[in-house]
Amino acid sequence: MNLSNLQPAEGSTHNQNKRLGRGEGSGKGGTAARGHKGAKSRSGYSKKIGFEGGQMPLQRRVPKFGFKNINRKEYEGVNLDTLQLLVDNGSITDSVSMTDFVANRLATKNEIVKILGRGELKAKLKVTAHKFTATAKAAIEAAGGEAVTI
């Protein structure tokens, strides 16, 4: 390597285009390839998202409907068959609480857990959760367990 064959490292240079607005002799001087006048030729121009050239944008043309309840509580559902599967695997033994749900990735620590009634539960469990469906509560108690609401 010597001064006659120096070149930048591979991938270190990106822009091989002609430099704009550097005099008429460069071929890209004057208007700097922006054309004449209009908003697009000015500095600081940025088109609004969804702008359709003055035509009424799709977002405003489409009719709006429905209602979003800002006070809605989103529950993370855990079914009885999932609990039975954890018992069969040996992940849980006699009681299930939020720490067990988080440890087994059934919910995150900030989520609200609701026990749902799908499947059947054979094991005697003390289940601690935020909510229970009526069928789930009945099934847990029928198996000799206990449903504790947080």
Image: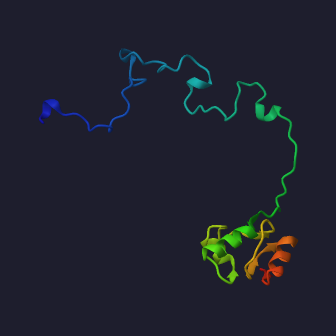
Quarter in which the C terminus is drawn: bottom right
Colour pattern: rainbow
User: Relative to residue 32, is residue 88 depicted above or below?
Assistant: below
Residue farthest along the left direction in this orientation = 2
Count of labels in the image:
0
Give the percent coordinates (x, y) of residue 87.
Answer: 66, 76
Q: Can you tell which quarter of the image residue 98 is in?
A: bottom right
Closer to us: 17 or 42? 17
Q: Can you tell which quarter of the image residue 97 is in?
A: bottom right
Closer to us: 131 or 27? 131
User: Relative to residue 130, is residue 72 depicted above or below?
Assistant: above
Closer to us: 111 or 64? 111
Q: Can you tell which quarter of the image residue 14 is in?
A: top left
User: Relative to residue 130, is residue 41 depicted above or below?
Assistant: above
Give the percent coordinates (x, y) of residue 6.
Answer: 18, 34
Q: Relative to residue 112, is residue 66 drawn left or right?
A: right
Q: Residue at x 38, y 20 (%)?
A: 23
Give the percent coordinates (x, y) of residue 143.
Answer: 79, 80
Q: Relative to residue 103, is residue 57 drawn left or right?
A: right
Q: Residue at x 83, y 81 (%)?
A: 141
Q: Residue at x 81, y 68 (%)?
A: 117
Give the percent coordinates (x, y) of residue 130.
Answer: 78, 74
Q: Relative to residue 66, is residue 24 drawn left or right?
A: left
Quarter in which the N terminus is drawn: top left
